[in-house]
């Protein structure tokens, strides 16, 4: 796990095991707030030990930006924390999350002791505010990657933990592209100092509009290719030939996973358009 301090008492923890997933922590004078966990037990436990043992700050709140396993499977290693998420996050963890974990345990012994932990506190419209010391954290909906996606804004520092609505490569298999575009367009309006993506590197103030535009351009291009595939005799063969570089991204992103995710995006989008066309 890689640890980085991005402001006074604000940390990012990046997985070295899976897809450069990010979690974060805001350390207060009496307690701390954790934003997401990492996918594998050893990395989530390492986060807990750093904050509670090395820094001496108990974790009072754990916020999940969405229900996906790589951000929530570590919940069970924080039994003393109050867990917070969107109401849809609770519902999806309780259904899809349990099913996915059961399947994953059949193939991965590292997950044998992992259990699903549901949010204790949920919200829907209007968001939610937390405070630790002099810091205010605003939780608000940022759907598109998933229906339950939220962002966590550190108001005084102008730092956003975006969850997976911001990634080096947009990923839409479980989401909605139009909603994703709407959420992405909100981000530059926040006038941020730093943006912590759900995966990948920290984005600095001057880079944020550029990176958001890059993701929007990528979405526009895969839309175009997916619609062209509808007119081809061999649509899947056509899409397989559309490289990630054709859509403005690099295959080395996310430790080399980007090319595979890109082709999943194309195929999923084509299938949705075909379903709409065929009624």
Image (cartoon, rainbow, N blue to C red):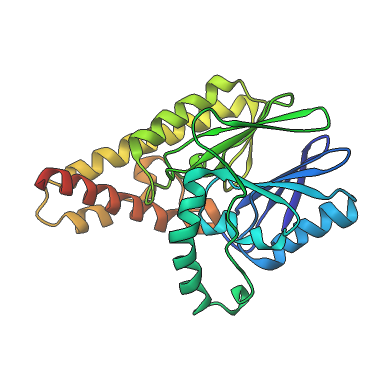
Q: Is residue 228 above or below residue 21?
A: above
Q: Quadrant of the N terminus?
A: bottom right
Q: Quadrant of residue 54?
A: bottom right
Q: Residue furthest front?
A: 120
In percent of width and height, residue 76 lies at 66, 62
In percent of width and height, residue 110 lies at 62, 75
Q: Is residue 11 above or below residue 234?
A: above
Q: Depth check: 184 or 207 in front?
A: 184
In percent of width and height, residue 107 lies at 50, 78
In percent of width and height, residue 203 lies at 62, 35
Going by the image, does 62 lie left or right of 88? right
Q: Depth check: 272 or 60 in front?
A: 60
Going by the image, does 263 lie left or right of 224? right
Q: Is residue 241 visible?
A: no
Q: Is residue 112 above or below residue 90?
A: below
Q: Is residue 71 visible?
A: yes
- Residue at 34% from the left image edge and 39% from the top image edge: 177
- Residue at 23% from the left image edge and 45% from the top image edge: 226
User: Disc count in the image?
Assistant: 0
- Residue at 60% from the left image edge and 73% from the top image edge: 111
- Residue at 62% from the left image edge and 69% from the top image edge: 114
């Amino acid at each position: 796990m890689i640890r980085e301090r991005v402001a006074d008492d604000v940390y990012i923890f990046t997985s070295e095991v899976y897809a450069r997933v990010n979690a974060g922590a805001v350390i207060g004078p009496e307690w701390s707030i954790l934003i997401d966990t990492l996918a594998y037990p050893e990395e989530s436990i390492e986060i807990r030990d750093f904050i509670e043992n090395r820094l001496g700050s108990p974790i009072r709140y754990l916020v999940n930006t969405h229900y996906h396993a790589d951000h929530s499977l570590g919940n069970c290693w924080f039994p003393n924390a109050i867990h917070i998420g969107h109401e849809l996050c609770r519902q999806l963890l309780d259904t899809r999350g349990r099913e996915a974990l059961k399947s994953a345990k059949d193939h991965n012994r590292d997950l044998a002791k992992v259990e699903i932990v549901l949010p204790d506190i949920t919200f829907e419209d209007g968001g939610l505010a937390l405070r630790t010391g002099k810091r205010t954290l605003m939780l608000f909906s940022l759907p598109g990657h998933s229906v339950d996606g939220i962002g966590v804004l550190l108001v005084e520092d102008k730092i956003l933990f975006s969850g997976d609505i911001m990634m080096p490569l947009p990923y839409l298999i479980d989401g909605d592209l139009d909603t994703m575009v709407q959420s992405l367009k909100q981000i530059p309006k926040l006038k941020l100092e730093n943006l912590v993506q759900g995966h990948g590197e920290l984005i600095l103030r001057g880079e944020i509009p550029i990176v958001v535009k890059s993701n929007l351009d990528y979405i526009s291009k895969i839309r175009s290719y997916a619609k062209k595939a509808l007119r081809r005799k061999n649509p899947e063969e056509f899409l397989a030939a559309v490289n990630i570089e054709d859509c403005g991204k690099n295959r080395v992103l996310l430790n080399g996973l980007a090319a595979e995710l890109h082709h999943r995006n194309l195929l999923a989008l084509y299938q949705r358009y075909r379903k709409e066309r065929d009624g």
